[in-house]
């Protein structure tokens, strides 16, 4: 039985951004009868009393007021109604208190301006819609604004880019709580790709491609089929029929990453899938993901995901795999 993921509080307010609000309700509030474990509980938490107007002429009624945030394990902040408007002091204080007791805060699009005003993003990385990144950086210079990622996971604080990137960020949180296989099933029900390629801290944030990828898509697919191999930049450049200098520039333009970072991200995707769905040893998985030693694999996996490979398998693998965890750990010394 998986752990109860707790209550998700979705903020609502007059002038609500309907699409971002709907994303959070769809992912965290929709019943999931396909799963035999506890799903998220959710409540709509209103900043104002009475019906709140949302874009499109929709009116929203809240389940509770800000006092309900004290019960939430996760708080979702949809796009804020006016970036120039400082959020109410009582909201900012409630968010600080929630963060202080360990709640996760996830903003979608311009919702990051609420987190920024609270001071919780000071000296941390964050992102927002590409139209607002410069404004965010200028108004809040202590925030390290990353304009190229779909979202940034800073532990308790997750910030996403433009509206649809909120889906990616919410699926990322599902993967953190339940593993990538469950997140993939939720994505399938949404009829969307479960993960867009790229890399950032933790294990899903993906950069926005600035240019069309038609000229490198074949190479990327070829590389994904050979992640167990070293795949040097010189080899990739030669296959793309470019000089190394041109290849590095085109690769970053297309993916937002260096080839090394992109390969690391893809190898972590493969590693998580193997740990969740297979019974192979940690050593074999390390080899299949292109690592020369199991020690370097453990180090890279822990840095990317925040867990050791064995701990990840124990948390997100099947019961059969969990039963083999002790054998893998004893044989390979994976702590």
Image (tube, rainbow, N blue to C red):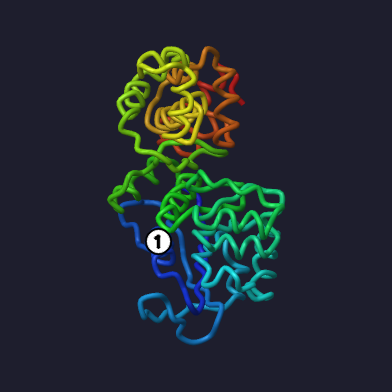
What residue sits 39% from the left and 65% below the top? 19
Quarter of the picture containing the C terminus is top right
Q: Is residue 262 above or below residue 204?
A: above
Image coords of residue 11 (percent x, y): 52, 70
- The answer to whether residue 323 shows anywhere in this view is no
Q: Is residue 332 above or below residue 176?
A: above
Q: Is residue 159 above or below residue 21?
A: above
122 vs 22, left or right, is right
Q: Residues within 10 Å of mark 1 (few under 14, many from 20)?
A: many
Image coords of residue 136 (percent x, y): 61, 57
- Determine which quarter of the picture holds residue 111: bottom right
Question: In terms of depth relative to the viewer, which is nearer, 233 or 223?
Answer: 233
Q: Is residue 50 above or below residue 87?
A: below
Q: Which residue is mark 1?
A: 23
- The answer to whether residue 286 shows anywhere in this view is yes
What residue sits 40% from the left and 58% below the top? 27
* Tally of numbered tags: 1
Image coords of residue 94 (percent x, y): 66, 70
Q: Secondary structure at mark 1?
A: helix
What residue sits 46% from the left and 32% below the top? 322
Question: In terms of depth relative to the viewer, which is nearer, 281 or 190?
Answer: 190
Image coords of residue 235 (percent x, y): 42, 12
């Amino acid at each position: 039985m998986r752990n109860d993921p707790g209550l998700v509080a979705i903020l609502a307010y007059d002038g609500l951004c309907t699409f971002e609000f709907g994303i959070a309700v769809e992912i965290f509030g929709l019943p999931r009868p396909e799963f035999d474990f506890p799903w998220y509980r959710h409540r709509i938490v209103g900043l104002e009393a009475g019906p709140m107007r949302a874009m499109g002429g929709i009116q929203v009624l809240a389940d509770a007021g800000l006092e309900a945030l004290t019960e939430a394990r996760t708080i979702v902040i949809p796009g804020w109604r006016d970036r120039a408007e400082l959020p109410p002091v009582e909201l900012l204080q409630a968010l600080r208190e929630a963060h202080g007791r360990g709640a996760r805060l996830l903003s979608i699009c311009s919702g990051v301006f609420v987190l920024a005003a609270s001071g919780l993003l000071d000296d941390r990385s964050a992102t927002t819609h590409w139209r607002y990144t410069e404004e965010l950086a200028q108004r809040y210079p202590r925030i390290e604004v990353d304009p190229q990622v779909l979202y940034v996971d800073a532990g308790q604080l997750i910030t996403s880019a433009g509206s649809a990137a909120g889906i990616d960020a919410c699926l990322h949180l599902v993967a953190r709580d339940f593993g990538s296989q469950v997140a993939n099933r939720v994505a399938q029900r949404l009829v969307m790709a479960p993960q867009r390629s790229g890399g950032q801290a933790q294990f899903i944030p993906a950069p926005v491609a600035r240019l069309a990828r038609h000229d490198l898509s074949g190479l990327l697919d070829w590389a994904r089929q050979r992640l167990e191999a070293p795949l040097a930049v010189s080899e990739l450049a030669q296959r793309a029929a470019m000089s190394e200098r041109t290849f590095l520039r085109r690769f970053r333009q297309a993916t937002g990453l260096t080839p090394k970072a992109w390969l690391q991200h893809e190898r972590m995707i493969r590693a998580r899938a193997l740990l969740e769905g297979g019974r192979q040893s940690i050593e074999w998985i390390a080899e299949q993901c292109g690592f020369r030693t199991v020690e370097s694999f453990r180090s890279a996996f822990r840095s990317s995901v925040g867990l050791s490979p064995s701990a990840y398998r124990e948390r997100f693998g099947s019961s059969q795999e969990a039963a083999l965890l002790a054998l893998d750990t004893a044989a390979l010394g994976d702590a």
